[in-house]
Amino acid sequence: MELIPALRAFARTFYGAPNDADDLVQETLVKALKAFESFEPGTRLKSWMFTIMRNTFYTKVKVYAREAPAAADCVAGKLSVQATQEWSVRAREVANALDKLPPHQREVLTLIGMLGVSYEETAEICGCAVGTVKSRLNRARIQILEDLGEASAADDA
């Protein structure tokens, strides 16, 4: 139960809509319960759950690509009135910048920058080397700063 907030945060890197993210968390929990006998004691449950979520999402993407429904372009899901508060606008800019990142960079940025997962654990979850994780994180950071108009801060780093 204590992993659900972290799972929800990670799921939001895959889906912007809270309901879709919650569905992914629920599906991850169901799969984890069904496969719990394959969990190796002494390893990190959080990493195991994140790996299940990541694999579940990418499987859904493959199925979605084959089915190709047109619901993503539906006007009904768009806001009719934009928020006027400056913080809301800036939050939307950050969210848009995150959405522009390639999925592998977005998930590394979320795991390390938002959820505080270690480089080693992130490498295990993503199935790549620690150096690749560091490279993806650096590229994501630079791209986010550029998209937010903070390119000079990226150049100084």
Image: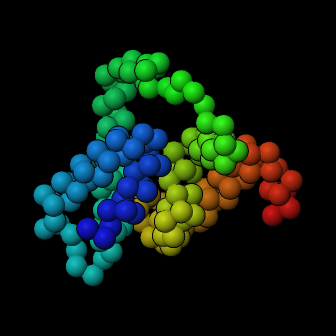
Q: Please tell me in which quadrant of the rendered image residue 130 appears.
A: bottom right
Q: Quadrant of the image for the N terminus?
A: bottom left
Front in this rendered view, residue 15 or 38: 15
Give the residue at x 53% y 24%. Answer: 80
Q: Is residue 150 left or right of residue 140?
A: right
Give the residue at x 30% y 31%. Answer: 63
Can you say whether 52 is above or below 63 in the image?
below
Give the residue at x 74% y 51%. Answer: 145
Residue 19 at least partly seen: yes
- Give coordinates of residue 109: x percent, y percent: 57, 57
Q: Quadrant of the image for the C terminus?
A: bottom right
Q: Please tell me in which quadrant of the rendered image residue 132 appears.
A: bottom right
Front in this rendered view, residue 66 or 142: 142
- Give coordinates of residue 90: x percent, y percent: 68, 46
Can you say whether 117 is above or below 135 in the image?
below
Can you say whether 1 is above or below 126 in the image?
below
